[in-house]
């Protein structure tokens, strides 16, 4: 079940791509499934829509810890900014950059 996942479309992903890319340069953005699994104090997780249901469920559980977890239709709109179109999972550590990204995202679901 992936009920803890919020949906993000390609246009919404493109709107935050430059900020996520800046995070990659500064070490605030974590790329890849193993990196996201190992990292604590995340504020945002983005999953490609094509990722397995089990992985979506696993990472979706992080929402219980206050992490906003998004299933992205077209994550390559974000990862291309980092020159890494092969990445299917990425996250942003808690902090001011994550707060800025949140300001550009739709509000949490009710």
Image (cartoon, rainbow, N blue to C red):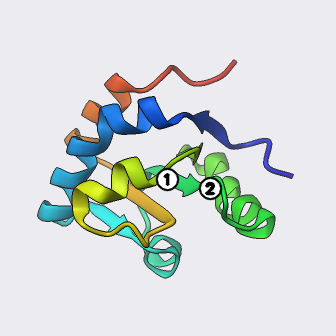
Q: Specify whether 36 is left or right of 69.
A: left
The percent coordinates of residue 58 (x first, y second) are: 72, 65
Q: Residues within 10 Å of mark 2 (few under 14, many from 20)?
A: many
Say if 32 sits above or below 70 in the image. Answer: below
- Evaluate if marks 2 and 1 touch, with contact meaning CB atoms under 8 Å apart: yes
Query: Which one is in front, 20 or 63?
Result: 20
Q: Quadrant of residue 52?
A: bottom right
- Front residue of this view, candidates 78 and 104: 78
x, y percentage for residue 99? 29, 34
Q: Which residue is mark 1?
A: 45
- Camera sees residue 60: yes
Q: Is residue 58 above or below residue 69?
A: below
Observer-side mark, 2 or 1, equals 1
Residue visible at 24% across and 54% down?
Answer: 81
Instruction: Tell me which residue sits at (57%, 24%) in the image.
Output: 108
Q: Residue at x 25, y 32 (%)?
A: 100
Give me the disc on residue 55: none
Q: Is 60 located above or below residue 5 in the figure?
A: below
Quadrant of the rendering where the C terminus is positioned: top right
Q: Quadrant of residue 39?
A: bottom left
Q: Position of residue 82 (x, y in %)?
A: 24, 62
Instruction: Using the rendered view, name the quadrant where residue 7 is placed.
Output: top right
Q: Could you tell which of marks 2 and 1 lies nearer the N-terminus?
A: 1
Do we see residue 93 in this rendering? Answer: no
Q: Secondary structure at mark 2?
A: helix
Give the Cα distance between marks 2 and 1: 9 Å
Q: Which mark is drawn over residue 62?
A: 2
x, y percent for residue 61:
70, 56
């Amino acid at each position: 079940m992936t009920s803890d996942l919020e949906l993000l479309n390609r246009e919404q992903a493109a709107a935050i791509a430059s900020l996520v890319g800046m995070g990659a340069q500064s070490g605030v953005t974590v790329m890849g499934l193993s990196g996201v699994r190992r990292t604590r104090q995340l504020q945002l997780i983005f999953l490609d829509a094509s990722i397995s249901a089990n992985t979506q469920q696993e990472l979706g559980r992080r929402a219980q810890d206050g992490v906003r977890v998004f299933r992205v239709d077209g994550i390559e709109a974000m990862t291309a900014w980092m020159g890494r179109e092969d990445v299917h999972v990425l996250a942003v550590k808690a902090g001011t950059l994550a707060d800025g990204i949140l300001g550009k995202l739709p509000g949490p679901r009710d």
